[in-house]
Amino acid sequence: MEENRLTGLPSVDKPWLNYYDAEAAHASLPACTLYELLWESNKDHLEDIALNYYQNRLTYAELFRGIDRTMKSLSALGVKQGDIVVVCTVNTPEMVYLLYALNRLGAVANMIDPRTNVDGIREYILESDARLVVTVDMAYPAIAKAIRGTEVRQVVAISPADSLPGVVRMLYRLKNKTVQLGREAMNWKEFLRRGQDATPVDVPYQKDTCCVMAHTGGTTGFPKAVMLSNDNINAMTYGYRYVRIPFARKQRYFNDLPPFIMYGLCLCVHTTLVYGLEVILYPLFDSKDFPRQFVRYMPHHFSALSDHLKYLASDKVTSKTDLSHLITAAVGGDALNQTLEREVNVYLKARGCKYEATKGYGMTELAATATTSTPEANAIGSVGIPLACNTIKIVDPDTGKELGYNQTGEIWISGPTIMLGYYNKPEETAELIQTDDTGRRWVHTGDLGHISPEGLLFHEGRIRRIYMTAHEGQPAKIFPMVVEDALKQSPGVGECSVVGRKRAGSAYYEAVAYLVKRDKGADEDALRAELAALCAQRVPTYMIPAEYRFLDELPHTPIGKVDFRRLEKEAVLAQNQSAPQGQ
Protein backbone atom coordinates (compact mmCIF):
# COMPACT_ATOMS: atom_id res chain seq x y z
CA MET A 1 0.00 0.00 0.00
CA GLU A 2 1.07 3.58 -0.66
CA GLU A 3 1.72 5.83 2.31
CA ASN A 4 -1.43 7.69 3.32
CA ARG A 5 -1.35 10.73 5.61
CA LEU A 6 -4.27 10.39 8.00
CA THR A 7 -6.46 13.29 9.07
CA GLY A 8 -8.43 11.08 11.42
CA LEU A 9 -11.62 11.18 9.33
CA PRO A 10 -12.10 8.20 6.99
CA SER A 11 -14.32 9.98 4.47
CA VAL A 12 -11.64 12.63 4.01
CA ASP A 13 -8.68 10.27 3.85
CA LYS A 14 -10.39 7.52 1.82
CA PRO A 15 -7.64 5.05 2.81
CA TRP A 16 -9.44 2.26 0.91
CA LEU A 17 -8.31 3.89 -2.34
CA ASN A 18 -4.80 2.64 -1.57
CA TYR A 19 -6.05 -0.79 -2.62
CA TYR A 20 -7.10 0.50 -6.05
CA ASP A 21 -5.30 1.60 -9.18
CA ALA A 22 -5.19 5.38 -9.70
CA GLU A 23 -7.72 5.08 -12.51
CA ALA A 24 -10.44 3.71 -10.22
CA ALA A 25 -11.06 6.91 -8.25
CA HIS A 26 -11.68 8.94 -11.42
CA ALA A 27 -13.24 6.37 -13.73
CA SER A 28 -16.36 7.49 -15.56
CA LEU A 29 -19.38 5.28 -15.05
CA PRO A 30 -21.38 3.85 -17.97
CA ALA A 31 -24.34 5.96 -19.13
CA CYS A 32 -26.50 3.27 -20.70
CA THR A 33 -29.25 0.78 -19.96
CA LEU A 34 -28.68 -2.61 -18.35
CA TYR A 35 -29.26 -4.25 -21.71
CA GLU A 36 -26.83 -1.96 -23.54
CA LEU A 37 -24.06 -2.74 -21.05
CA LEU A 38 -24.76 -6.46 -21.40
CA TRP A 39 -24.66 -6.25 -25.22
CA GLU A 40 -21.53 -4.12 -25.46
CA SER A 41 -19.72 -6.45 -23.08
CA ASN A 42 -20.59 -9.64 -24.97
CA LYS A 43 -21.31 -8.80 -28.62
CA ASP A 44 -17.89 -10.11 -29.65
CA HIS A 45 -18.20 -13.32 -27.64
CA LEU A 46 -21.59 -14.65 -28.69
CA GLU A 47 -20.54 -18.31 -28.73
CA ASP A 48 -19.47 -18.28 -25.07
CA ILE A 49 -21.85 -19.91 -22.60
CA ALA A 50 -24.05 -17.40 -20.78
CA LEU A 51 -26.56 -19.53 -18.83
CA ASN A 52 -26.43 -23.06 -17.51
CA TYR A 53 -29.81 -24.36 -16.40
CA TYR A 54 -29.64 -28.01 -15.31
CA GLN A 55 -26.93 -28.56 -17.94
CA ASN A 56 -28.94 -26.80 -20.66
CA ARG A 57 -26.09 -24.51 -21.64
CA LEU A 58 -27.22 -21.41 -23.54
CA THR A 59 -24.75 -19.21 -25.41
CA TYR A 60 -24.77 -15.43 -25.31
CA ALA A 61 -26.23 -15.52 -28.83
CA GLU A 62 -29.12 -17.64 -27.52
CA LEU A 63 -29.50 -15.32 -24.55
CA PHE A 64 -29.89 -12.31 -26.84
CA ARG A 65 -32.34 -14.18 -29.07
CA GLY A 66 -34.39 -15.06 -26.00
CA ILE A 67 -34.42 -11.40 -24.96
CA ASP A 68 -35.51 -10.36 -28.47
CA ARG A 69 -38.44 -12.80 -28.52
CA THR A 70 -39.53 -11.82 -25.02
CA MET A 71 -39.40 -8.14 -25.91
CA LYS A 72 -41.64 -8.71 -28.95
CA SER A 73 -44.18 -10.62 -26.86
CA LEU A 74 -44.26 -7.99 -24.13
CA SER A 75 -44.85 -5.35 -26.76
CA ALA A 76 -47.67 -7.43 -28.26
CA LEU A 77 -49.32 -7.45 -24.82
CA GLY A 78 -49.14 -3.65 -24.77
CA VAL A 79 -46.19 -3.13 -22.41
CA LYS A 80 -44.65 0.28 -23.01
CA GLN A 81 -42.22 2.76 -21.52
CA GLY A 82 -42.87 3.49 -17.85
CA ASP A 83 -45.17 0.50 -17.27
CA ILE A 84 -44.58 -1.49 -14.09
CA VAL A 85 -44.76 -5.25 -14.58
CA VAL A 86 -44.95 -7.52 -11.53
CA VAL A 87 -42.35 -10.30 -11.83
CA CYS A 88 -42.95 -13.13 -9.37
CA THR A 89 -40.54 -15.87 -10.32
CA VAL A 90 -37.38 -17.84 -9.55
CA ASN A 91 -34.05 -18.35 -11.32
CA THR A 92 -34.82 -19.57 -14.84
CA PRO A 93 -33.61 -18.42 -18.26
CA GLU A 94 -37.06 -16.88 -18.84
CA MET A 95 -36.52 -14.61 -15.83
CA VAL A 96 -33.28 -13.34 -17.36
CA TYR A 97 -34.91 -12.78 -20.76
CA LEU A 98 -37.72 -10.90 -19.05
CA LEU A 99 -35.41 -8.61 -17.07
CA TYR A 100 -33.58 -7.35 -20.13
CA ALA A 101 -36.63 -7.29 -22.43
CA LEU A 102 -38.46 -5.00 -20.00
CA ASN A 103 -35.30 -2.90 -19.81
CA ARG A 104 -35.21 -2.46 -23.59
CA LEU A 105 -38.84 -1.28 -23.58
CA GLY A 106 -38.18 1.24 -20.82
CA ALA A 107 -40.54 -0.65 -18.50
CA VAL A 108 -39.99 -1.51 -14.83
CA ALA A 109 -39.51 -5.01 -13.42
CA ASN A 110 -41.24 -5.10 -10.01
CA MET A 111 -39.55 -8.13 -8.41
CA ILE A 112 -41.55 -9.91 -5.71
CA ASP A 113 -41.15 -13.12 -3.72
CA PRO A 114 -43.33 -15.99 -5.04
CA ARG A 115 -43.88 -17.05 -1.41
CA THR A 116 -45.74 -13.80 -0.64
CA ASN A 117 -49.29 -14.37 0.58
CA VAL A 118 -52.36 -13.27 -1.37
CA ASP A 119 -52.85 -10.02 0.54
CA GLY A 120 -49.21 -9.10 0.11
CA ILE A 121 -49.24 -9.76 -3.63
CA ARG A 122 -52.43 -7.70 -4.00
CA GLU A 123 -50.79 -4.85 -2.11
CA TYR A 124 -47.78 -4.90 -4.46
CA ILE A 125 -50.07 -4.90 -7.51
CA LEU A 126 -52.25 -2.05 -6.26
CA GLU A 127 -49.27 -0.02 -5.10
CA SER A 128 -47.64 -0.10 -8.54
CA ASP A 129 -50.86 0.00 -10.61
CA ALA A 130 -49.62 -3.05 -12.53
CA ARG A 131 -51.57 -4.39 -15.52
CA LEU A 132 -49.43 -7.47 -16.19
CA VAL A 133 -48.05 -10.16 -13.87
CA VAL A 134 -45.42 -12.69 -14.90
CA THR A 135 -45.19 -15.51 -12.39
CA VAL A 136 -43.72 -18.92 -11.80
CA ASP A 137 -46.62 -21.32 -12.28
CA MET A 138 -46.45 -22.64 -8.70
CA ALA A 139 -47.44 -19.19 -7.43
CA TYR A 140 -50.31 -18.83 -9.90
CA PRO A 141 -53.09 -19.95 -7.50
CA ALA A 142 -52.16 -17.09 -5.14
CA ILE A 143 -51.79 -14.67 -8.07
CA ALA A 144 -55.24 -15.59 -9.40
CA LYS A 145 -56.79 -14.60 -6.08
CA ALA A 146 -54.61 -11.52 -5.63
CA ILE A 147 -55.54 -9.89 -8.96
CA ARG A 148 -59.25 -9.76 -8.12
CA GLY A 149 -60.27 -6.13 -7.82
CA THR A 150 -57.06 -4.88 -9.48
CA GLU A 151 -56.29 -3.60 -12.98
CA VAL A 152 -54.43 -6.80 -13.92
CA ARG A 153 -55.99 -8.39 -16.98
CA GLN A 154 -53.17 -10.66 -18.13
CA VAL A 155 -50.93 -13.19 -16.38
CA VAL A 156 -48.02 -15.07 -17.94
CA ALA A 157 -47.01 -18.28 -16.15
CA ILE A 158 -43.47 -19.62 -16.41
CA SER A 159 -42.85 -23.28 -15.60
CA PRO A 160 -39.43 -24.23 -14.21
CA ALA A 161 -39.63 -26.98 -16.85
CA ASP A 162 -39.79 -24.59 -19.83
CA SER A 163 -36.02 -24.54 -20.38
CA LEU A 164 -35.10 -27.90 -18.90
CA PRO A 165 -33.31 -30.36 -21.20
CA GLY A 166 -35.53 -33.14 -22.58
CA VAL A 167 -35.18 -36.01 -20.10
CA VAL A 168 -35.06 -33.73 -17.07
CA ARG A 169 -38.16 -31.90 -18.33
CA MET A 170 -40.04 -35.17 -18.66
CA LEU A 171 -39.08 -36.25 -15.13
CA TYR A 172 -40.10 -32.88 -13.74
CA ARG A 173 -43.54 -33.08 -15.33
CA LEU A 174 -44.05 -36.63 -14.09
CA LYS A 175 -43.21 -35.54 -10.55
CA ASN A 176 -45.10 -32.23 -10.52
CA LYS A 177 -48.75 -31.65 -11.29
CA THR A 178 -49.58 -29.31 -14.16
CA VAL A 179 -50.90 -26.00 -12.85
CA GLN A 180 -54.32 -25.22 -14.31
CA LEU A 181 -54.45 -21.64 -15.61
CA GLY A 182 -57.50 -19.39 -15.75
CA ARG A 183 -58.81 -17.41 -18.71
CA GLU A 184 -56.64 -14.39 -17.96
CA ALA A 185 -53.44 -16.48 -17.97
CA MET A 186 -51.21 -17.99 -20.63
CA ASN A 187 -48.13 -20.18 -20.47
CA TRP A 188 -44.73 -19.12 -21.77
CA LYS A 189 -45.14 -20.90 -25.10
CA GLU A 190 -48.39 -19.05 -25.83
CA PHE A 191 -46.82 -15.80 -24.66
CA LEU A 192 -44.00 -16.17 -27.20
CA ARG A 193 -46.42 -17.10 -29.97
CA ARG A 194 -48.33 -13.83 -29.50
CA GLY A 195 -45.21 -11.78 -30.19
CA GLN A 196 -44.16 -13.34 -33.47
CA ASP A 197 -45.28 -10.40 -35.62
CA ALA A 198 -44.55 -7.54 -33.21
CA THR A 199 -41.96 -4.88 -34.11
CA PRO A 200 -40.94 -3.17 -30.85
CA VAL A 201 -38.41 -0.35 -30.68
CA ASP A 202 -35.74 0.05 -27.99
CA VAL A 203 -36.36 3.00 -25.68
CA PRO A 204 -33.19 5.14 -25.45
CA TYR A 205 -31.31 5.40 -22.15
CA GLN A 206 -32.53 8.15 -19.85
CA LYS A 207 -30.62 9.15 -16.76
CA ASP A 208 -32.16 8.47 -13.34
CA THR A 209 -35.21 6.55 -14.51
CA CYS A 210 -36.43 3.50 -12.63
CA CYS A 211 -35.84 0.10 -14.25
CA VAL A 212 -36.16 -2.29 -11.30
CA MET A 213 -38.27 -2.21 -8.15
CA ALA A 214 -37.31 -4.38 -5.19
CA HIS A 215 -38.67 -4.62 -1.70
CA THR A 216 -37.15 -4.20 1.74
CA GLY A 217 -37.26 -7.03 4.24
CA GLY A 218 -40.36 -5.76 6.00
CA THR A 219 -39.10 -6.37 9.56
CA THR A 220 -40.39 -2.95 10.64
CA GLY A 221 -43.69 -2.89 8.74
CA PHE A 222 -44.97 -3.56 5.21
CA PRO A 223 -41.98 -3.71 2.83
CA LYS A 224 -41.14 -0.52 0.98
CA ALA A 225 -40.61 -0.57 -2.80
CA VAL A 226 -37.08 0.50 -3.68
CA MET A 227 -36.67 2.19 -7.07
CA LEU A 228 -33.33 1.41 -8.75
CA SER A 229 -32.14 2.96 -11.99
CA ASN A 230 -29.89 1.70 -14.77
CA ASP A 231 -27.25 4.03 -13.35
CA ASN A 232 -27.53 2.57 -9.84
CA ILE A 233 -27.13 -1.04 -10.92
CA ASN A 234 -24.52 -0.42 -13.61
CA ALA A 235 -22.43 1.64 -11.18
CA MET A 236 -22.34 -1.29 -8.77
CA THR A 237 -21.46 -3.64 -11.63
CA TYR A 238 -18.73 -1.32 -12.87
CA GLY A 239 -17.24 -1.12 -9.38
CA TYR A 240 -16.14 -4.73 -9.68
CA ARG A 241 -13.74 -3.79 -12.49
CA TYR A 242 -11.28 -2.48 -9.94
CA VAL A 243 -11.50 -4.73 -6.87
CA ARG A 244 -8.98 -7.25 -8.23
CA ILE A 245 -11.24 -10.25 -7.81
CA PRO A 246 -10.03 -12.26 -10.82
CA PHE A 247 -13.24 -12.59 -12.82
CA ALA A 248 -12.52 -14.01 -16.26
CA ARG A 249 -14.69 -14.86 -19.22
CA LYS A 250 -15.91 -18.48 -19.32
CA GLN A 251 -15.54 -19.00 -15.56
CA ARG A 252 -18.56 -20.61 -13.88
CA TYR A 253 -20.65 -18.71 -11.32
CA PHE A 254 -23.21 -20.62 -9.23
CA ASN A 255 -26.33 -18.66 -8.32
CA ASP A 256 -29.17 -19.96 -6.20
CA LEU A 257 -30.00 -16.57 -4.67
CA PRO A 258 -33.51 -15.61 -5.83
CA PRO A 259 -33.98 -12.68 -8.23
CA PHE A 260 -36.23 -10.74 -5.87
CA ILE A 261 -33.15 -10.23 -3.66
CA MET A 262 -31.02 -7.53 -5.27
CA TYR A 263 -27.87 -9.33 -4.19
CA GLY A 264 -29.07 -12.16 -6.44
CA LEU A 265 -30.29 -10.01 -9.34
CA CYS A 266 -27.73 -7.18 -9.51
CA LEU A 267 -24.60 -9.12 -8.62
CA CYS A 268 -25.22 -12.79 -9.38
CA VAL A 269 -27.07 -12.22 -12.67
CA HIS A 270 -26.35 -8.80 -14.20
CA THR A 271 -22.77 -8.26 -13.03
CA THR A 272 -21.63 -11.79 -13.80
CA LEU A 273 -23.16 -11.73 -17.28
CA VAL A 274 -21.59 -8.36 -18.02
CA TYR A 275 -18.20 -9.90 -17.24
CA GLY A 276 -18.86 -12.82 -19.57
CA LEU A 277 -19.16 -15.60 -17.00
CA GLU A 278 -21.24 -18.75 -17.32
CA VAL A 279 -24.05 -18.24 -14.82
CA ILE A 280 -25.43 -21.44 -13.33
CA LEU A 281 -29.08 -20.72 -12.57
CA TYR A 282 -30.49 -22.83 -9.77
CA PRO A 283 -34.13 -22.11 -8.87
CA LEU A 284 -34.13 -23.67 -5.39
CA PHE A 285 -32.71 -21.69 -2.48
CA ASP A 286 -31.48 -24.44 -0.17
CA SER A 287 -28.32 -24.00 1.91
CA LYS A 288 -28.29 -27.65 3.03
CA ASP A 289 -28.38 -28.87 -0.59
CA PHE A 290 -25.64 -26.47 -1.67
CA PRO A 291 -22.68 -28.88 -1.17
CA ARG A 292 -24.26 -31.40 -3.56
CA GLN A 293 -24.85 -28.73 -6.20
CA PHE A 294 -21.34 -27.37 -5.71
CA VAL A 295 -19.82 -30.76 -6.51
CA ARG A 296 -22.15 -31.13 -9.49
CA TYR A 297 -21.11 -27.85 -11.14
CA MET A 298 -17.69 -27.11 -9.57
CA PRO A 299 -18.05 -23.33 -9.98
CA HIS A 300 -15.19 -20.85 -9.83
CA HIS A 301 -17.37 -18.36 -7.95
CA PHE A 302 -20.51 -18.28 -5.84
CA SER A 303 -22.30 -15.76 -3.68
CA ALA A 304 -24.37 -17.04 -0.81
CA LEU A 305 -25.52 -16.65 2.76
CA SER A 306 -23.42 -17.72 5.73
CA ASP A 307 -25.27 -21.05 5.98
CA HIS A 308 -24.01 -22.01 2.53
CA LEU A 309 -20.42 -21.68 3.74
CA LYS A 310 -21.20 -23.55 6.96
CA TYR A 311 -22.60 -26.54 5.08
CA LEU A 312 -19.89 -26.42 2.43
CA ALA A 313 -17.20 -26.71 5.11
CA SER A 314 -18.96 -29.41 7.16
CA ASP A 315 -20.77 -31.65 4.67
CA LYS A 316 -19.34 -35.10 3.90
CA VAL A 317 -19.93 -34.49 0.20
CA THR A 318 -17.44 -31.61 0.09
CA SER A 319 -15.13 -32.56 2.98
CA LYS A 320 -12.48 -33.91 0.59
CA THR A 321 -13.31 -31.95 -2.58
CA ASP A 322 -10.39 -30.32 -4.39
CA LEU A 323 -11.03 -26.55 -4.30
CA SER A 324 -7.93 -25.37 -6.14
CA HIS A 325 -10.21 -23.99 -8.88
CA LEU A 326 -12.36 -21.94 -6.48
CA ILE A 327 -11.81 -18.17 -6.48
CA THR A 328 -14.80 -16.55 -4.77
CA ALA A 329 -16.64 -18.10 -1.85
CA ALA A 330 -18.66 -15.00 -1.06
CA VAL A 331 -21.16 -14.32 1.69
CA GLY A 332 -23.56 -11.42 2.05
CA GLY A 333 -27.04 -10.67 3.27
CA ASP A 334 -26.22 -11.39 6.91
CA ALA A 335 -23.17 -11.32 9.15
CA LEU A 336 -20.57 -14.10 8.97
CA ASN A 337 -19.44 -14.71 12.53
CA GLN A 338 -15.70 -14.74 13.08
CA THR A 339 -15.54 -18.30 14.38
CA LEU A 340 -17.23 -19.64 11.24
CA GLU A 341 -15.11 -17.37 9.05
CA ARG A 342 -11.91 -18.85 10.51
CA GLU A 343 -13.24 -22.39 10.15
CA VAL A 344 -14.18 -21.78 6.52
CA ASN A 345 -10.80 -20.24 5.74
CA VAL A 346 -9.01 -23.24 7.26
CA TYR A 347 -11.21 -25.56 5.21
CA LEU A 348 -10.63 -23.61 1.98
CA LYS A 349 -6.87 -23.58 2.45
CA ALA A 350 -6.75 -27.28 3.33
CA ARG A 351 -8.62 -28.12 0.13
CA GLY A 352 -6.24 -26.11 -2.07
CA CYS A 353 -8.14 -22.83 -2.48
CA LYS A 354 -5.78 -19.85 -2.77
CA TYR A 355 -8.38 -17.35 -1.52
CA GLU A 356 -10.14 -16.72 1.76
CA ALA A 357 -13.90 -16.30 2.13
CA THR A 358 -15.12 -13.07 0.54
CA LYS A 359 -17.47 -10.85 2.56
CA GLY A 360 -19.49 -7.84 1.61
CA TYR A 361 -21.97 -5.33 2.90
CA GLY A 362 -24.84 -3.56 1.22
CA MET A 363 -28.54 -2.79 1.11
CA THR A 364 -31.35 -3.08 -1.39
CA GLU A 365 -31.34 0.73 -1.35
CA LEU A 366 -27.71 0.64 -2.58
CA ALA A 367 -28.26 -1.82 -5.46
CA ALA A 368 -26.88 -4.65 -3.32
CA THR A 369 -23.12 -4.28 -2.81
CA ALA A 370 -21.55 -1.22 -1.18
CA THR A 371 -18.37 -2.84 0.14
CA THR A 372 -16.53 -6.05 -0.63
CA SER A 373 -13.41 -7.75 0.59
CA THR A 374 -10.68 -8.41 -1.95
CA PRO A 375 -7.68 -10.74 -1.95
CA GLU A 376 -5.61 -7.88 -0.48
CA ALA A 377 -8.25 -6.37 1.84
CA ASN A 378 -9.80 -9.21 3.82
CA ALA A 379 -9.31 -8.97 7.57
CA ILE A 380 -11.21 -11.39 9.82
CA GLY A 381 -14.49 -9.77 10.91
CA SER A 382 -14.42 -7.06 8.26
CA VAL A 383 -16.82 -6.63 5.35
CA GLY A 384 -14.12 -5.27 3.09
CA ILE A 385 -13.58 -1.89 1.48
CA PRO A 386 -16.00 0.42 -0.33
CA LEU A 387 -16.34 0.05 -4.07
CA ALA A 388 -14.16 2.77 -5.56
CA CYS A 389 -17.19 4.87 -6.52
CA ASN A 390 -18.48 4.93 -2.94
CA THR A 391 -17.55 6.94 0.15
CA ILE A 392 -18.24 5.78 3.69
CA LYS A 393 -18.12 7.60 6.97
CA ILE A 394 -18.95 6.74 10.56
CA VAL A 395 -21.20 9.20 12.37
CA ASP A 396 -22.19 9.65 16.00
CA PRO A 397 -25.96 8.90 15.94
CA ASP A 398 -26.64 11.47 18.65
CA THR A 399 -24.57 14.44 17.44
CA GLY A 400 -24.23 13.82 13.69
CA LYS A 401 -20.47 14.36 13.99
CA GLU A 402 -18.16 12.22 11.88
CA LEU A 403 -16.04 9.89 14.00
CA GLY A 404 -12.44 8.86 13.49
CA TYR A 405 -10.82 5.49 12.94
CA ASN A 406 -11.84 2.55 15.11
CA GLN A 407 -14.74 4.51 16.64
CA THR A 408 -18.18 2.94 16.51
CA GLY A 409 -21.09 4.87 15.08
CA GLU A 410 -23.70 4.76 12.33
CA ILE A 411 -22.50 3.80 8.84
CA TRP A 412 -23.29 6.46 6.23
CA ILE A 413 -22.70 5.75 2.54
CA SER A 414 -22.57 8.06 -0.47
CA GLY A 415 -22.19 7.14 -4.11
CA PRO A 416 -23.91 6.53 -7.46
CA THR A 417 -25.62 3.31 -6.33
CA ILE A 418 -28.03 5.15 -4.00
CA MET A 419 -31.59 4.37 -5.02
CA LEU A 420 -33.87 6.92 -6.65
CA GLY A 421 -36.16 6.59 -3.64
CA TYR A 422 -38.98 4.56 -2.15
CA TYR A 423 -41.95 4.34 -4.52
CA ASN A 424 -44.63 6.85 -3.50
CA LYS A 425 -43.00 7.29 -0.06
CA PRO A 426 -41.19 10.66 -0.05
CA GLU A 427 -41.12 10.95 3.75
CA GLU A 428 -39.48 7.55 4.22
CA THR A 429 -37.05 8.40 1.43
CA ALA A 430 -36.09 11.69 3.10
CA GLU A 431 -35.56 9.86 6.39
CA LEU A 432 -33.07 7.42 4.84
CA ILE A 433 -31.29 9.71 2.34
CA GLN A 434 -30.13 13.13 3.44
CA THR A 435 -28.14 15.75 1.55
CA ASP A 436 -25.22 17.59 3.16
CA ASP A 437 -24.12 21.20 2.65
CA THR A 438 -22.05 20.25 -0.41
CA GLY A 439 -25.01 18.59 -2.16
CA ARG A 440 -23.76 15.06 -1.55
CA ARG A 441 -26.46 12.48 -0.77
CA TRP A 442 -25.86 10.08 2.13
CA VAL A 443 -27.71 6.92 3.05
CA HIS A 444 -28.15 6.68 6.82
CA THR A 445 -27.97 2.89 6.97
CA GLY A 446 -29.16 2.34 10.53
CA ASP A 447 -26.19 -0.01 10.96
CA LEU A 448 -23.35 0.34 13.44
CA GLY A 449 -19.73 -0.07 12.49
CA HIS A 450 -16.24 1.33 12.42
CA ILE A 451 -13.49 1.87 9.85
CA SER A 452 -9.91 0.80 10.43
CA PRO A 453 -6.98 3.07 9.45
CA GLU A 454 -6.45 0.69 6.51
CA GLY A 455 -9.92 1.54 5.19
CA LEU A 456 -11.73 -1.70 6.06
CA LEU A 457 -15.30 -1.54 7.32
CA PHE A 458 -16.38 -3.61 10.33
CA HIS A 459 -20.12 -4.10 10.75
CA GLU A 460 -21.33 -4.21 14.36
CA GLY A 461 -25.10 -4.64 14.19
CA ARG A 462 -28.26 -2.60 13.79
CA ILE A 463 -28.94 0.67 15.59
CA ARG A 464 -32.54 -0.36 16.01
CA ARG A 465 -31.25 -3.37 17.96
CA ILE A 466 -29.72 -1.14 20.60
CA TYR A 467 -31.77 -1.58 23.75
CA MET A 468 -31.83 0.98 26.54
CA THR A 469 -31.13 -0.30 30.03
CA ALA A 470 -29.77 1.06 33.31
CA HIS A 471 -26.53 0.47 35.19
CA GLU A 472 -25.77 1.85 38.62
CA GLY A 473 -28.63 4.30 38.30
CA GLN A 474 -27.50 5.62 34.90
CA PRO A 475 -28.89 4.89 31.41
CA ALA A 476 -26.82 2.41 29.41
CA LYS A 477 -27.12 0.56 26.10
CA ILE A 478 -27.21 -3.14 25.27
CA PHE A 479 -25.41 -3.89 21.99
CA PRO A 480 -26.52 -7.40 20.93
CA MET A 481 -23.54 -7.97 18.67
CA VAL A 482 -21.14 -7.47 21.60
CA VAL A 483 -22.89 -10.27 23.49
CA GLU A 484 -23.16 -12.47 20.39
CA ASP A 485 -19.43 -12.15 19.73
CA ALA A 486 -18.74 -13.35 23.27
CA LEU A 487 -21.16 -16.28 23.04
CA LYS A 488 -19.67 -17.42 19.74
CA GLN A 489 -16.33 -17.99 21.50
CA SER A 490 -17.86 -21.07 23.11
CA PRO A 491 -17.16 -24.27 21.16
CA GLY A 492 -20.61 -25.47 22.21
CA VAL A 493 -22.45 -22.72 20.32
CA GLY A 494 -23.33 -23.23 16.67
CA GLU A 495 -25.42 -20.10 16.16
CA CYS A 496 -26.79 -17.39 18.40
CA SER A 497 -28.85 -14.22 18.37
CA VAL A 498 -29.35 -11.78 21.23
CA VAL A 499 -32.47 -9.65 21.56
CA GLY A 500 -33.89 -7.33 24.19
CA ARG A 501 -37.13 -7.42 26.13
CA LYS A 502 -38.42 -5.08 28.78
CA ARG A 503 -37.79 -6.11 32.35
CA ALA A 504 -40.96 -6.94 34.25
CA GLY A 505 -42.44 -3.70 35.56
CA SER A 506 -39.68 -1.55 34.03
CA ALA A 507 -39.15 0.67 31.01
CA TYR A 508 -35.62 -0.70 30.66
CA TYR A 509 -34.53 -3.76 28.70
CA GLU A 510 -32.60 -6.92 29.50
CA ALA A 511 -30.79 -9.20 27.08
CA VAL A 512 -32.07 -12.66 26.12
CA ALA A 513 -29.79 -15.05 24.21
CA TYR A 514 -31.14 -17.60 21.73
CA LEU A 515 -28.72 -20.36 20.84
CA VAL A 516 -28.34 -23.39 18.62
CA LYS A 517 -26.09 -26.05 20.14
CA ARG A 518 -23.25 -27.36 17.99
CA ASP A 519 -23.76 -30.78 19.60
CA LYS A 520 -27.47 -31.54 19.76
CA GLY A 521 -26.92 -33.87 22.72
CA ALA A 522 -24.98 -31.38 24.87
CA ASP A 523 -26.28 -30.73 28.40
CA GLU A 524 -28.11 -27.39 28.35
CA ASP A 525 -27.62 -26.54 32.03
CA ALA A 526 -23.87 -27.09 31.78
CA LEU A 527 -23.71 -24.97 28.65
CA ARG A 528 -25.74 -22.19 30.30
CA ALA A 529 -23.26 -22.11 33.18
CA GLU A 530 -20.34 -21.96 30.75
CA LEU A 531 -21.93 -19.13 28.77
CA ALA A 532 -22.75 -17.11 31.89
CA ALA A 533 -19.12 -17.38 32.99
CA LEU A 534 -17.94 -16.41 29.50
CA CYS A 535 -20.17 -13.33 29.43
CA ALA A 536 -19.06 -12.34 32.93
CA GLN A 537 -15.52 -12.15 31.59
CA ARG A 538 -16.17 -10.55 28.21
CA VAL A 539 -19.18 -8.21 28.34
CA PRO A 540 -20.34 -5.41 30.65
CA THR A 541 -22.52 -6.52 33.55
CA TYR A 542 -25.64 -4.82 32.21
CA MET A 543 -25.38 -6.70 28.89
CA ILE A 544 -25.20 -10.20 30.42
CA PRO A 545 -28.28 -12.12 29.24
CA ALA A 546 -31.06 -12.70 31.72
CA GLU A 547 -31.81 -15.98 29.95
CA TYR A 548 -30.09 -18.44 27.62
CA ARG A 549 -32.73 -20.21 25.54
CA PHE A 550 -32.03 -23.05 23.12
CA LEU A 551 -33.67 -23.68 19.74
CA ASP A 552 -33.21 -26.36 17.11
CA GLU A 553 -32.61 -23.56 14.61
CA LEU A 554 -32.92 -19.78 14.54
CA PRO A 555 -35.89 -18.32 12.65
CA HIS A 556 -35.08 -16.55 9.40
CA THR A 557 -36.78 -13.95 7.23
CA PRO A 558 -37.68 -14.90 3.63
CA ILE A 559 -34.32 -13.50 2.46
CA GLY A 560 -32.30 -15.61 4.89
CA LYS A 561 -31.49 -13.15 7.69
CA VAL A 562 -32.07 -14.00 11.34
CA ASP A 563 -35.58 -12.84 12.21
CA PHE A 564 -34.80 -11.01 15.44
CA ARG A 565 -38.28 -9.43 15.53
CA ARG A 566 -39.75 -12.90 15.86
CA LEU A 567 -37.26 -13.69 18.62
CA GLU A 568 -38.21 -10.48 20.45
CA LYS A 569 -41.83 -11.58 20.46
CA GLU A 570 -40.87 -15.07 21.61
CA ALA A 571 -38.80 -13.61 24.46
CA VAL A 572 -41.78 -11.60 25.71
CA LEU A 573 -44.07 -14.62 25.38
CA ALA A 574 -41.64 -16.78 27.38
CA GLN A 575 -41.45 -14.09 30.05
CA ASN A 576 -45.23 -13.94 30.36
CA GLN A 577 -45.55 -17.72 30.55
CA SER A 578 -43.00 -17.95 33.35
CA ALA A 579 -44.46 -15.06 35.39
CA PRO A 580 -46.24 -16.13 38.63
CA GLN A 581 -50.04 -16.15 38.39
CA GLY A 582 -51.55 -12.84 39.41
CA GLN A 583 -48.41 -10.90 38.53
Image (spheres, rainbow, N blue to C red):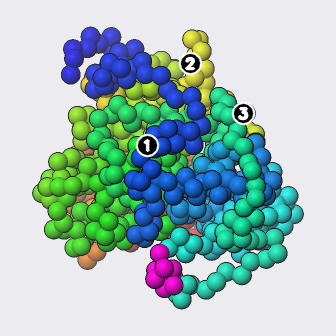
Front position among marks 3 and 1: 1
**Which quadrant would residue 248 be assigned to in this image?**
top left
Q: Tell me the tag on residue 440.
A: 2
Is residue 54 something that shows in the picture? yes
Magenta-highlighted residues: 165-172
Identify the amino acid type marked 3.
Glu
Location of the N terminus (image quadrant) = top left
Query: Is residue 76 found inside the magenta-colored segment of the image?
Result: no
Q: Tell me the tag on residue 427.
A: 3
Decide: is 101 above or below 23: below
Pointer 2 and pointer 3: residues touching (CB < 8 Å)? no
Query: Which is more N-terminal, label 1 or label 3?
Result: 1
Query: Which is more N-terminal, label 3 or label 2?
Result: 3
Q: Find numbered disc 2 in the image and state the secondary structure of the residue it sits on.
A: loop
Q: Tell me the tag on residue 44.
A: 1
Judge left or right: residue 196 versus residue 324: right
Identify the amino acid type marked 1.
Asp
Residue 166 percent location from the top left of the image: 48, 79
Judge left or right: residue 3 versus residue 109: left
**Which quadrant would residue 134 be assigned to in this image?**
bottom right
Identify the amino acid type marked 2.
Arg
Magenta part, dominant SS: helix
